[in-house]
Amino acid sequence: MKKLTLFLAAALLAASFAACGNSGASSSTAPEPTAIPDDILNAPATKPDPDMEIDPGFGVDPEDSSAALQPEPDAELSGIVDQIYAAHPVDLMMVETTAVDLTNAEWYPYQTGLNEEQITKVDAAVTSEPGVGSQAYCMVLVRLKDKANGDEIAEAMLGSRPFDLVIRNVQMVNVFSASIVSGSIGIVNGHIAGVFGPEEAPEGRRTMDGGSAYALPGFVDSHMHLESSMLTPDHFARVALSCGTTTVCADPHEIANVLGIEGVRGLADACRDLPLRVLLTAPSTVPSAPGLEDSGFDVGPAEMEALLDIPGVAGLGEVMDFNAVAAGDERMLSVIEAAASRGVFLDGHVSALTGRRLQIFRAMGIDSDHTTPSAEKLREELALGFTVQVQECMLSREIVQAMNDAPVQDRICLVTDDVPLPRLMRQGHLNFVVERAIELGLDPIRAIRYATINPAVRLRLYRTGGIAPGMEADIQLVQDLRHPRPELVLRAGEIVWDHGSYLPHTAPYQIPDHLQGSVHLRPVTEEDFAVTVPVRPGFSGGTAVVNLIGQDGVSIRTQRVRKALPLSAERDGFACLKTAPYLKMAVFNRYGRDQHGIGLLTGMDGVTGAAALTYGHDCHNLTVYGGNDADMALAANTLRESQGGLCTVENGKVLTLIPLPLAGLMCDLPPEVLLEQMEQLLSDCRRMGFNHQNLLTFFTLMPLAVSPELKCTDRGLVDALHKRLLPLIDEIKEISSDGT
């Protein structure tokens, strides 16, 4: 006869039922539990009443292929589950019994606790747990194949066998109790099976002495962009894991702007088998400022449906067009609804919204924001039920104090958002954000909570983000809580980083052909950079009132500045604007539209040479900055020929060229090599007079049409505050005959 093994993961059977039953009933009136019949394991499966009338409107069309996605649970095992519930009535919310797919290696270890060898001995399995509510309850029932050893399976499931790995002598940071406890951690099948005090000595097939280091959960980054690193996902994974980040949720709207659905699918494919867990969101606002810029893709409700169908996509990417949401724009709302109907989480970007407009945003189901510029805004968003995701650039003593004072702590997260490669390699990833928050006065354990369990819950990853039984063994060991630089990192129980060594051996990523060749642009000439205006015949010269992009060399926030600049005498019906000494920028559409915009920036007078890049938020058109038109044209054509990248030019010579073959955004160079080349390029720029404090960020954000106040896109100057295009030249004044 086939053998059966019953496993109750949360607690002993009787204890689980007592905890989940009607707590309001007194012990004197509570019914005595019905004893389970001795022959329950041999009882027939429960069958439906043959006289029961079934509504023909319910059910699944036999021809509907979707019905096969979730197999029916084994009837025999389901019947046993029903009899257990009948014998011990409990008050659980929406109990669901489902089949375990024994062929899916990604899920059966999570559902049963069994490894690949053990699962081959199982004939069928079901899980039963509450579908709604917070009860810590789960039941697993398996039927073993003939001659399989039931004791072995039970020991594996109940943790009575030796642990796969025991990490001894660590200071465990408990994010649930906000405490630090000395002891050991036992790991089985990639999960934490038990935590033990210093007096206990659990046995393991392998043991490791933690040397009294702090054991933290792996960091979870709930909002970031892979493309910002300019690294392919495999190279990014190595850097992130070395910093203690074991899970990221990436919004791929950068590559979506360039290559659309195929770009997102390609990125998802590249992330699928990484040692780093990568979730993606479906980009919601592409382009980010419709009518003010042009990209290679446009997301509507149909495109959103297709994006959500990509394996690995778990939520809606940041909704940036907050004005469209607040105004009830039909297209934007239909995109949000397409995601909301799937039941996924919805991310927002609402830096400029307060009051009733912010409430409208929240009423749409969008319940996160990573652009909190003030303590007052943070408190307002928390009060409305937002999850506030705080970037390093947003941290201040006032905001940190508001975080410390928040009466509810589970809706605050620390995130990275965009981390350029030099900062990633020199400062770190999410560990640097944690470190900065602590330096500004945030309680260290709260900082760790904000980077572990809180973002994990936000992402609906309920088995990661903490060190407790049943959680995935994503663990890092650090010597200093205030400066979390991991010596050892485990992902799903496997050591991936060990004292400076990256252990996973994965094949190098090969960029597919369809993700390359994304620059569709005619050759650029010097004349493309000239600013001319039509004038009357015989115009002898004068001035033009020009809208300049004012920048201070520190912030990426700009302002509108109006200046009068000289105009040359008429030639062939046009006069030419004399732009010196201001820095010129030009944004060329790289998606086949013959158009470009020109802007002039203050604060960088006297720049020689030129710099160009195809990475420029969010449309990633080709942007050129420079002090003379000849060098700017050479820089643009160099990137046209290389099909994307970054370069510097001076005196007609290309100084540094960094190709970015993957969508003109990312390259397959090792991080150390790319960093060296990037630093050389930035050194070229500073020597030529580009003097911004955060130069790479400055280059990439000057074309960002949703960033206040004045930016430049392929359509020209954009007033981001009022969502409108502005002319470069406001008015023309001619010099009169008397010289006035």
Image: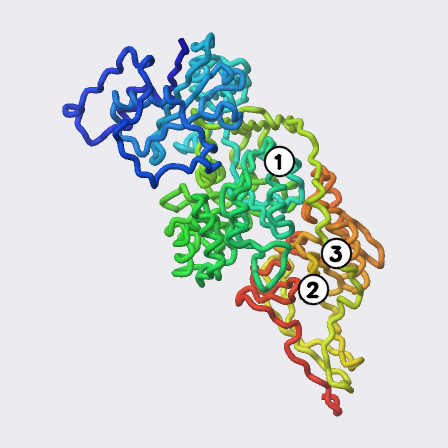
Q: Is residue 446 visible?
A: no
**Amino acid of disc 3:** Ala
Q: Secondary structure at mark 2?
A: strand
The x, y position of residue 92, in whole percent, is: 29, 31
- Per the model, the C-alpha gap separating discs 1 and 3 is 29 Å
Q: Earlier in the sequence, mark 1 or mark 3?
A: 1
The label shown at residue 596 is: 2
Separation of marks 2 and 1 at Cα, in angstroms: 36 Å
Residue bearing the label numbered 1: 237
Q: Foreground mark, 2 or 3?
A: 2
The image quadrant that residue 134 belongs to is: top left
Q: Quadrant of the C terminus?
A: bottom right
Residue designated by label 3: 611
| Earlier-in-chain disc, 2 versus 1 | 1
Q: Amino acid at mark 1?
A: Ala
Depth-wise, is mark 1 or mark 3 nearer the camera?
A: 1
Q: Which mark is residue 447?
A: none
Work out which residue is located at the far right of the displayed protein and give it. 652
Q: Is residue 168 left or right of residue 496?
A: left
Residue 573 rendering spot, x and y as whole percentages = 77, 81
Q: Residue furthest left?
A: 28
Crowding at label 3, few (<14), some or many (≥20) Cα neighbours within 10 Å?
many
Q: Name the amino acid type tagged 2.
A: His
- The residue depicted at 45 percent of the width and 63 percent of the height is 327
Q: How many marks?
A: 3
